Image (cartoon, rainbow, N blue to C red):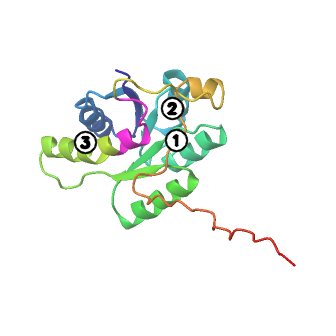
Amino acid sequence: MSRIRVLVVDDSVVVRRLVADALAGDPAIDVVGTAANGQIAQTKVEQLAPDLITMDIEMPVMDGIEAVRTLRRSGSRLPIIMFSTLTERGASATLDALAAGATDYVTKPANVGSVQESLASVAEQLVPKIKALVPHRGRTGALPTPAVGGATAARGAALVTPRPTAPRVVRLAPRSRPRVPCVP
C-alpha cells in the first residue's frame, strides 16, 4: 500500500502535533515531517518529497502565503491545503493564499472542547481533502506518478487535481449542422 506523504507546516508546536496525530489515525496517510515556518518548509519539501502540504498562514520568518508563492515560482505543483483560523482577517488571508496557488483550505478548530474532539474535527476536515487531492496514493494498486516535470514529478510532486469543493464543469463543443450539398 502506497501511503500519502504529508508535510505539516505551522508555527505552533501544539497545532503541528494535533494535525500530525489526527492524520496518523488514518492508515493511508503518513506524516513525513513538520516545519515551523515557510522557509523551513521549502527545505523539507526538497528533502522529504511529500505528496501534499498542510500550511498555516500566519508564521514568523516566512508566512504561508509567501511560502506558497515561492513553491509555485519554483515549479512545485504539490497540493497545498491552507490550515487557518476562521476570522475576518483569516478569511481574507485564506483567499490571498488561494490566489497565490494554494489548492484548498481547512479552518482550525476553535472552542471545540477536549483534545479528542479537536483531533476528530481536524481528521474529519483534512483526511477527505487529502485523499481527494492525492487519489493515486493511499490505496492498494496505486497508479504510478506521471512522468510530467522530470525529476520533480518523480520526487512525488503529482499533478494538482481540481479542488474537491469546486464544481466540475464540462463544456462540450457546439454541434454543427451537417452540410447538405447544393443540388442545382
Q: Amino acid at mark 2?
A: Ile
Q: Mark 3 vs mark 2: which is more N-terminal? A: 2
Label 1 SS: loop
Look at the picture and state if 143 lies above or below 74: above
| Residue at left offset 13%, top offset 41% | 116
Query: Crowding at label 2, few (<14), some or many (≥20) Cα neighbours within 10 Å?
Result: some
Image-based side of 56 in relation to 44, left or right: left
Q: Which residue is mark 3?
A: 123
Name the residue nearer the viewer: 26 or 42: 26
Q: Which residue is mark 2?
A: 40
| Residue at left offset 31%, top offset 44% | 128
Which image quarter holds the C terminus?
bottom right
Question: In the figure, residue 52 lies in which quadrant?
Answer: top left
User: Do residues under tags 3 and 2 come within 8 Å of each other at their CB atoms?
Assistant: no
| Residue at left offset 45%, top offset 57% | 94
| Residue at left offset 30%, top offset 51% | 108
User: Do residues under tags 3 and 1 come within 8 Å of each other at their CB atoms?
Assistant: no
Residue 159 image label: none
Q: Depth-wise, is mark 3 or mark 1 nearer the camera? A: 3
In the rendered image, residue 1 lying in the magenta stretch gets the answer no
Q: Mark 1 vs mark 2: which is more N-terminal? A: 2
Name the residue nearer the viewer: 122 or 151: 151
Q: Amino acid at mark 1?
A: Val
Query: Crowding at label 1, few (<14), some or many (≥20) Cα neighbours within 10 Å?
Result: few
Q: Mark 3 vs mark 1: which is more N-terminal? A: 1
Which image quarter holds the N terminus?
top left
Q: Amino acid at mark 3?
A: Ala
User: Do residues under tags 1 and 2 come within 8 Å of each other at their CB atoms?
Assistant: yes
**Residue 71 point in image, percent of width and height:** 59, 39
Q: Depth-wise, is mark 3 or mark 2 nearer the camera? A: 3
